[in-house]
Structures are given as C-alpha cells and as structure tokens.
Amino acid sequence: MKRITVLLPAYNEEASLPLLHDKMVKTASENPGYEWEFLIVDDGSTDATHTLLQEFADKVTLVEYDTNKGKGYALKQGFKEARERGYDYAITMDSDDITFKRL
C-alpha cells in the first residue's frame, strides 16, 4: 500500500481548520487504497490554530514552531519529517486551500 503525506503549512488558520479537518477525513475514507498522513506544520501561529490542531491530534501529525519561520522553512521541515517517517509521496497545499480532489 502506498503511503501518502499531505503536507500543510499553517499560520493563523483557525477559521479554515474545521472545514479542512472534514475534508481530510473524507479524502482518506474515499481513497482507501492508500495510507494517508496529514502533516500540519504550525508555523508559529498566534491565533487558536494550535488549540484546534490539538483537538484533531488523532487525525493529523503535528509539527510546531514557537515563531514564524516562513512557508519555505515549514515545507522543508515537513518534507524531512515525511521522509523520516517512510512515506512514498508528499502532496503540498496551503491550509486555507481546502479543495481536495478524489484521486
């Protein structure tokens, strides 16, 4: 079974996270032929992003930074984490771009 990481850098995304969570669950359930990981890099958010992500801890892998280091750094660290965890593919998208498509 192929292992896929969806890598999502997040900075102050509290407004979009509930819908994002619903889309992640739906995407994984509609595509059972893959092992899914949703890797969210909280890049020093100052809103309730951290709190919401803690609520979703059973569905996501979370990497957190205390200060904003930028999207490029968040992606680099996310790719590193996915590689170390043995995933075959990584898909990147912004946390507020919640249009997941069936594969």
Image: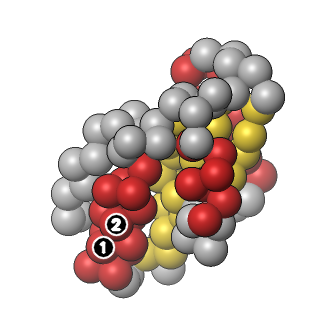
Quarter of the rendering containing residue 68: top right
Q: Nearer the viewer, residue 72 or 24?
A: 24
Q: 10 Å neighbourhood of mark 1: few (<14), some, or many (≥20)?
A: few
Q: Residue at x 23, y 64 (%)?
A: 103
Evaluate whether residue 25 shows in this view.
Answer: yes
Q: Residue at x 57, y 65 (%)?
A: 56
Q: Nearer the viewer, residue 52 or 20?
A: 52
Q: Position of residue 36 (x, y in %)?
A: 49, 69
Quarter of the rendering containing residue 21: bottom left
Q: Nearer the viewer, residue 98 or 30?
A: 98
Check residue 22 in the rendering and tell me which mark sits there, or answer none: 2
Relative side of 60 to 69, left or right:
left
Task: Please state which amino acid type lies under the numbered disc 1.
Answer: Lys
| Residue to which mark 1 is pinned | 26
Quarter of the rendering containing residue 23: bottom left
Check residue 74 in the rendering and tell me which mark sits there, or answer none: none
Evaluate whether residue 74 shows in this view.
Answer: no
Task: Tell me how the rendering is colored.
Answer: secondary structure
Q: Position of residue 5 (x, y in %)?
A: 52, 56
Q: Gap between marks 1 and 2, in whole Å?
A: 6 Å
Q: Residue at x 29, y 38 (%)?
A: 97
Is residue 95 depicted above or below 34 in this figure? Answer: above
Secondary structure under tag 1 reads helix
Q: Position of residue 90 (x, y in %)?
A: 50, 48
Please report contact status of discs 1 and 2: CB closer than 8 Å, yes or no.
yes
Relative side of 25 to 62, left or right:
left
Q: Position of residue 42 (x, y in %)?
A: 64, 37
